[in-house]
Image: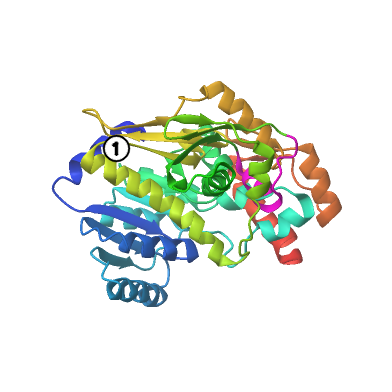
């Protein structure tokens, strides 16, 4: 697997002579919203392929998005459908990647569709990390297929990247370059809250730099508090540092949100932001900052800069406000509360607190550690013993 900067240079060179190829793996609600947002960009320089099992269902879903987008006068991209792609079958995924030759791959799949895992875990154990084996189940297959296909595409993962991407990297496997969602969902809430607190009308010009894991995305969004954990955050407006009362800001981040699939508008938007940033810097230069969980195999969530200003493109964790070691420590402190004690040498270790909570809430004996070759077994256990008995 090539380093991210080499992949970005390859992408930049390829799209000089042809359209940028984007492969969406899995056309559930995240994939549907993402397709809609991409078509709404009026970008004739994109070719999109959606891949999944059912050609008939995907065709129906793609058609409604294409027609609705064209009614709005926005659709300019080509859209292809690749049916018969079973994410549990590495050969079929490999064939799809080889055939389409993507520049960007987005994994928007879910191992257990139609359910927000947090609807079970948050009210019972106040942690999401229990679901890591389910979150990694399909992306590990996609990354193995990626290697077999000898792809140079930039890969974006959608599901619990805070732990999933470092799990793959620590096991010596190919791993996604970016994660979407999680920490990125807090940034707009913070901008809205700061704009109201400080009387700033153009809230889109409020710059937030934040390093934190999935747990605090959830607890701040749902409850407006941080569990007494100090936050690694920098807030600026037109280059002027702001120092609002953070407790007030986080309380104001508790805004009503739907609990169903409509929430996936945010995750799809996070994917769109990364894709837009990559294509913009590759085509026009400049720098963009995004917030990504699991960036470059790091545990937790980080600010990331995609830079196209020089001869070569680059992507790196932004250390303008905080050094990497400090961000690592803060993320480990945060993700511990999500039930993840460590991810190292291909082994995910749950916290003792999560194991005890699962025993009390679900009557199960959660394994302390899940080795990489035990992922499928752990995923089946979570489906049969937790999801199907508690949904």
Q: Is residue 359 left or right of residue 97?
A: right
Q: Which residue is mark 1?
A: 8
Q: Position of residue 299 (x, y in %)?
A: 57, 34
Res 205 quadrant in image? top left
Q: Which residues are magenta?
A: 213-228
Q: Nearer the viewer, residue 43 or 373?
A: 43
| Relative depth, front residue between 339 and 197 | 197
Considering only vertical position in the picture, is 90 above or below 61?
Answer: above
> Which residue does the image show at 69% across and 39% down from the upper left?
247
Q: Residue at x 35, y 75 (%)?
A: 59
Position of 14 with respect to 342 (left or right) is left
Magenta span main SS? helix
Q: Quadrant of the C terminus?
A: bottom right
Query: Please, is residue 290 above or below residue 90 in the view?
Result: above
**Residue 100 seen anywhere in this rendered image of the structure:** yes
Q: Quadrant of residue 306?
A: top left
Q: Is residue 329 left or right of residue 88?
A: right
Answer whether residue 219 is magenta in the image: yes
Q: Residue at the far front: name it.
A: 199
Whether 82 is drawn above or below 144: the answer is below
Asked if the stretch drawn in magenta spans residue 332, the answer is no
* Residue located at (70% from left, 62% from top): 387
Q: Dot 1, crowdedness within 10 Å: few (<14), some or many (≥20)?
A: many
Q: Position of residue 341 (x, y in %)?
A: 69, 34
Q: Is residue 11 visible?
A: no
Query: Judging from the image, what secondary structure is the residue with disc 1 in?
Result: helix
| Residue at (32, 43) in percent of width and height | 278
In the rendered image, the residue lying farthest to the right is 360
Instruction: Locate residue 304, reporting x and y percent.
Output: 43, 35
């Amino acid at each position: 697997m090539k380093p991210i900067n080499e992949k970005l240079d390859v992408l930049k060179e390829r799209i000089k002579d042809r359209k940028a190829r984007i492969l969406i793996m899995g056309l559930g609600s995240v994939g549907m919203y993402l397709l809609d947002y991409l078509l709404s960009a009026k970008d004739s320089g994109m070719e999109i392929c959606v891949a999944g099992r059912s050609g008939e269902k995907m065709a129906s879903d793609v058609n409604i998005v294409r027609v609705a987008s064209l009614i709005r006068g926005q659709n300019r991209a080509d859209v292809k459908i690749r049916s018969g792609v079973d994410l549990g079958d590495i050969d079929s995924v490999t064939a799809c990647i080889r055939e389409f030759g993507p520049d960007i791959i987005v994994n928007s799949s879910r191992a257990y569709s139609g359910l927000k895992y947090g609807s079970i875990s948050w009210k019972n154990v106040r942690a999401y990390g229990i679901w890591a084996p389910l979150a990694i189940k399909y992306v590990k297959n996609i990354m193995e297929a990626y290697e077999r296909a000898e792809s140079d595409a930039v890969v974006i993962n959608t599901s619990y990247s805070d732990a999933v991407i470092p799990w793959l990297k620590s096991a010596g496997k190919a791993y996604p370059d970016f994660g979407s969602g999680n920490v990125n969902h807090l940034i707009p809430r913070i901008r809205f809250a700061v704009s109201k607190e400080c009387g700033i009308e153009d809230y889109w010009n409020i710059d937030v730099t934040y390093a934190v894991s999935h747990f605090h995305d959830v607890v701040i969004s749902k409850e407006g508090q941080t569990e007494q954990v100090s936050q690694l955050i920098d807030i600026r407006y037109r280059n002027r540092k702001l120092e609002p009362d953070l407790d007030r800001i986080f309380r104001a981040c508790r805004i009503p949100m739907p609990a169903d699939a409509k929430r996936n508008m945010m995750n799809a938007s996070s994917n769109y932001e990364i894709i837009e940033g990559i294509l913009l810097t590759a085509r026009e230069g400049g720098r963009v900052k995004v917030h990504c969980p699991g960036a470059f195999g790091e545990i937790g969530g980080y600010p990331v800069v995609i830079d196209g200003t020089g001869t070569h493109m680059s992507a790196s964790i932004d250390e303008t406000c905080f050094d990497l070691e400090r961000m690592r420590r803060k993320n480990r402190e945060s993700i511990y509360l999500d039930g993840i004690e460590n991810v190292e040498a291909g082994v995910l270790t749950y916290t003792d607190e999560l194991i005890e909570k699962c025993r009390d809430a679900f009557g199960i004996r959660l394994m302390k550690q899940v080795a990489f070759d035990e992922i499928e077994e752990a995923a089946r256990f979570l489906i049969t013993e937790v999801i199907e008995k508690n949904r």
